[in-house]
């Protein structure tokens, strides 16, 4: 309980603000929180080589891939999973004596920011070059894709009344009808960074102000959003596409909108979960094998099956019932562009009233 409360505070501090804090302050925050919730080793079989994985993905969503990697390579995997921002700050703190070999995170902005801060080391290989370039950046490579969609409760809103663009949510007719995550959520912040790239700061600020003016309810995370929409507390929720599938699988009467598909519209925004090799990693060779492995079809299939995400390796199928990357219009922003935007997006959103 204490850890959870401290975690909240920490997320709001945010890895992306860290550069403006002194090292002492960062350490102070960590010490006060004691919030690095390390999950013990996943208990995989013994091997001569070791790989330490820090993961901002939830344990059930990474463990099957780690087990497969260990089985194929004999490398013993040690997993520490936790909040992505807290782990990112842990990596910064450990920069002079790295404890992790790889970092897995659920947002291109966090990965790019760590790359820019010199926490991640560049790596290129034939394997990761099969992942399209717009899903890679300095020191990191995307592993799975997620679309920013609007999910809705079919019992609360008629087809004809649905928004078609993200910007439609500014319409006063949606007042009190929208649930979303706030700026502590990396995917929401990433979405605002993409919007700023496509539409500019002024329009993005207007959009956030209109969400606030429309009395949008900002919940702690996307699981809260999808459940609230599923239960019928809100007609509309802004989420990643897999939250719609998770809610649908629970039997809720939900539908999904991939926004901004019309001519002249900006397209649906995509973000990625991805991985980077820690600079100074003790097990660099194992880390490189791991990153290569994540870009192979077997690993991409495991990820796609685990959580309805889009495989990024061309030719690998998404789970049945899930759309494929390539069958809808995507915002044309290279995800490497998000790293430098995150501070600004946080300030812009907070300034416009988004918690
Ligand atoms: Fe998520």
Image (tube, rainbow, N blue to C red):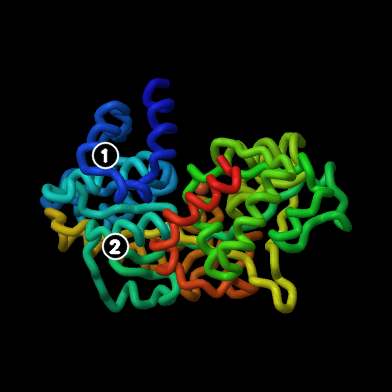
Q: Nearer the viewer, residue 296 or 180?
A: 180
Q: Does ligand 1 reach within 8 Å of label 1's beta carbon?
A: no
Q: Would you say 73 lies left or right of 304 here?
A: left
Q: Quadrant of the N terminus?
A: top left
- Dot 2 crowding, Cα within 10 Å, few <14, some 14–19, many 20+: some
Residue 223 point in image, percent of width and height: 58, 40
291 over 248 or under it: above or below: below
* Disc 2 secondary structure class: helix
Residue drawn where x is 40% and y is 68% of the image: 336
- Dot 1 crowding, Cα within 10 Å, few <14, some 14–19, many 20+: many
User: Is residue 198 at all visible to an observer of this figure?
Assistant: yes
Residue drawn where x is 13% and y is 53% of the image: 49
Residue of label 2: 116
In space, the residues marked 2 and 1 are separated at their CA atoms by 18 Å
Q: Nearer the viewer, residue 260 or 44?
A: 260
Residue 90 figure quarter:
top left
Residue 224 point in image, percent of width and height: 60, 36
Residue of label 1: 26
Q: Earlier in the sequence, mark 2 or mark 1?
A: 1
Residue 207 point in image, percent of width and height: 66, 56
Residue drawn where x is 40% and y is 73% of the image: 131
The tag on residue 311 is none
* Disc 1 secondary structure class: helix
204 over 267 or under it: above or below: above
Q: Nearer the viewer, residue 137 or 26?
A: 26
């Amino acid at each position: 309980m204490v850890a959870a409360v401290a975690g909240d505070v920490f997320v709001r501090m945010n890895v992306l603000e860290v550069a403006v804090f002194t090292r002492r302050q960062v350490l102070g925050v960590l010490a006060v929180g004691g919030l690095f919730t390390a999950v013990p080793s996943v208990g995989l079989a013994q091997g001569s080589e070791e790989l330490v994985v820090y993961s901002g993905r939830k344990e059930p969503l990474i463990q099957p891939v780690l087990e497969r990697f260990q089985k194929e390579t004999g490398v013993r995997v040690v997993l520490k999973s936790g909040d992505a921002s807290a782990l990112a700050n842990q990596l910064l703190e450990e920069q002079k004596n790295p404890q992790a070999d790889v970092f897995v995170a659920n947002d291109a902005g966090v990965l790019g920011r760590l790359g820019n801060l010199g926490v991640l080391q560049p790596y290129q290989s034939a394997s990761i070059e099969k992942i399209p370039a717009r899903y890679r950046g300095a020191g990191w490579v995307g592993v799975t894709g997620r679309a920013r969609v609007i999910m809705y409760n079919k019992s609360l809103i008629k087809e004809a009344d649905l928004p078609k663009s993200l910007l439609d949510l500014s319409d006063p007719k949606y007042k009190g009808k929208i649930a979303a995550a706030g700026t502590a959520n990396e995917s929401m912040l990433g979405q605002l960074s993409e919007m700023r790239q496509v539409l500019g700061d002024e329009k993005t600020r207007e959009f956030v102000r209109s969400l606030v003016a429309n009395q949008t309810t900002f919940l702690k995370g996307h699981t809260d959003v999808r459940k609230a929409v599923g239960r019928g507390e809100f007609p509309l929720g802004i989420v990643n596409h897999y939250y719609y599938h998770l809610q649908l699988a629970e039997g809720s009467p939900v539908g999904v909108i991939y926004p901004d598909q019309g001519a002249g519209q900006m397209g649906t925004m995509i973000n990625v979960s991805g991985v980077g090799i820690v600079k100074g990693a003790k097990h660099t060779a194992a880390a490189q094998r791991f990153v290569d492995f994540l870009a192979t079809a077997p690993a991409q299939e495991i990820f796609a099956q685990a959580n309805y995400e889009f495989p990024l390796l061309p030719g690998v199928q998404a789970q049945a019932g899930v759309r494929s990357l390539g069958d809808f219009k995507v915002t044309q922003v290279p995800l490497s562009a998000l790293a430098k935007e995150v501070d600004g997006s946080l300030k812009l959103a907070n300034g416009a009233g988004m918690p």
